[in-house]
Image (cartoon, helix red, strand yellow):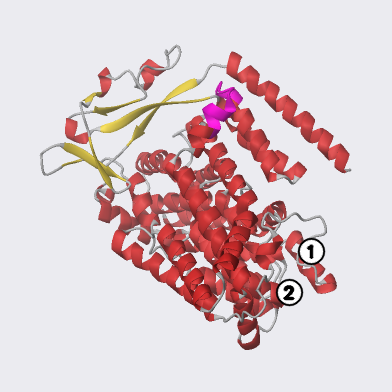
Amino acid sequence: MFQFTKRISFIFFVLSLTTAFYINFKVSPTWVETQLQYQTYSNELGQLAYRASGQESLITNPVPYNESPLRQSVLNNQQGKPELSQQWVYKGTPDNAVLLKADFHFGIWSLLPALVAVVLCLMTREPLVALFGGIVIGAVMLGRFDITHEVFIPNIGTSSAASILILYLWLLGGLMGVWAKTGAAKAFADHMSQHYVKGPRSAKVVTWFLGLVFFQGGTMSTVLVGTTVKPIADKAGVSHEELSYVVDSTASPIASIIAFNAWPAYIQAFLFIPGVAFLATENDRIAFFFASIPFSFYAILAVLGTLLLSLNITIFSGAPLKKAIKRVAETGELDAPNASPISAKELHQSQVPEGYTAHRLEFILPLVSLIIIAIGSYFVTGSPQIHWAFSGALFLSIFMALAKGMALKQVLDGFGNGLKGVVVASVILMFALTIGVLSKQLGGGIYLVESLGEQIPYWSLPIILQLMTIVIAFSTGTSWGTYAIAFPLGLPLAWTIAQSQGLDNPELYLMVCFATILNGSVYGDQCSPISDTTILSSMTTGCDLMDHVKSQIVPASYAALLAGILWTSTVLFFA
């Protein structure tokens, strides 16, 4: 059976590669005008400026829209790549400038690299091979045949790639390695087991509760909760599929409900719609975000779903999770027989030197410092400084070990073992980042949005936006990247439909459409095997990546389906 699957996977890849060459040489890209709306203003020097990612940038030499070579009427006749990639334009006065960009797509073929990566992941259960295959397909489609110099080096040489390597290879890996060397994680697990955790159910409830406490969302919450509960849950006999599902399905969903984090500040920049008074200022848009929280039906249902599983109510859990629960009860095996966890087992085994006695505070104090620094830096700088937080926790762990008499050589040995344990996961993260960039450059998200028309029934738009963002986020592995594509296009479309079809409550309709984009992106990201949070959930809990994906997608899909029904019902009865 394995050889047959291997042969089919190879044939599928060869056919996909042949298709990629055909697209590169024979299929002309479709050029699309993209408008990015920013709230522009005059700074203290009287210069026209806008703010993005917390930085002020000047707007220079805006031109009338009807003179720009990047408008759609010109791009429709474009032969080859436009001379300009972006340009500031205005209709009316320069004070109302928008950034005009020329993007392209290859139609439905733009989704091919992500499709190849996902299919190969499912068939081979080898995420490294699958992601590399998707990268090769995307590179060939773009004509970047020197993959090392034209794809990997430009992507690995970015600040975001360096941030991933430093955080997840050095800081996270080093911290887990030091905890394994000192026995701190085991000491904490023993204490929790003696006083609070009495079995699998209480271990899962603790995991769920910590997911709510660490509501910063995304990779930070996933790593924090996963590394904290892993020793507790293992001791209590919780399957790794259950653990990774509870960790993953509370991280991003809870961040969109308890949104005292970086999400509103990031997302509000994409919510500006010309002429809509209640979205005029940054404060207005953040207030709109919070007002829309009650409509985040998927996020609410996802968090409730993990609570039900934690309480051993498995009616909505799906067959894969039920099978994992049964396996642990009958055999005590936390992983499936053919599982290949992407986190090294030595990270979760005690390596305490002879004569060294671990104490639970060696786990608790670094963790507390991590949380304080992350939350404190959010209130001081406006964004949680994850690197500061993990650096502080790592250095505090090292200092405590040395202060208790552990030799420096032994500490460094633990640190080195930690790095070894997350190398594979870090490479997978780098590959996932690269394929996400390629998918965006190929215009898959733009193609999906362009396929929508304005002449659709108002009640169907929320479900269309949900499905669209699910596909984009699943194929790119990022919810935040999906927001940058979907919000500037989907919300103006929603407002136009609300006005043209004479809805009684257009603001509520816009809130529902906002929630569908927000939540659809979370679901797609959460279920994607090329998402950083999916990979990190598997890594920190010691779960096989594809076992996590296949077991999580069932309960998550139940929540997404019910959310779609609730969104449609809301606009039918109240908009």
Residue 265 versus residue 498 in the image, above or below: below
Amino acid type of disc 2? Gly
Residue 18 versus residue 524 in the image, above or below: above
Mark 2 lies on a secondary structure that is loop
Q: Position of residue 42 (x, y in %)?
A: 15, 41
Q: Residues within 10 Å of mark 1 (few under 14, many from 20)?
A: some
Q: Quadrant of residue 178?
A: bottom right
Residue 144 in magenta? yes
> Label for residue 296?
none
Badge 1 is on which residue? 323
Residue 230 versus residue 511 in the image, above or below: below
Extent of the magenta region: 140-152
The rendered magenta stretch, by its main secondary structure, is classed as helix
Q: Position of residue 11 (x, y in %)?
A: 79, 29
Mark 1 lies on a secondary structure that is helix
Query: Which residue is outermost to the left?
Result: 45
Q: Position of residue 457 (x, y in %)?
A: 48, 41
Distance between mark 2 and mark 1 Cα atoms:
14 Å
Badge 2 is on which residue? 237
Q: Residues within 10 Å of mark 2 (few under 14, many from 20)?
A: some
Mark before the other along the chain sequence, 2 or 1 = 2
Residue pictured at 29% horizontal, 20% vertical: 68
Question: Which quadrant is home to the N terminus?
Answer: top right
Of residues 379 and 558, the one nearer the viewer is 379
Residue pictured at 60% horizontal, 67% vertical: 410
Query: Which residue is outermost to the right?
Result: 1
Q: Position of residue 440 (x, y in %)?
A: 50, 35
- Could you tell me how many numbered marks the image carries? 2
Visible residue check, residue 452: no
Of residues 343 and 201, the one nearer the viewer is 343
Amino acid type of disc 1? Lys
Visible residue check, residue 529: yes
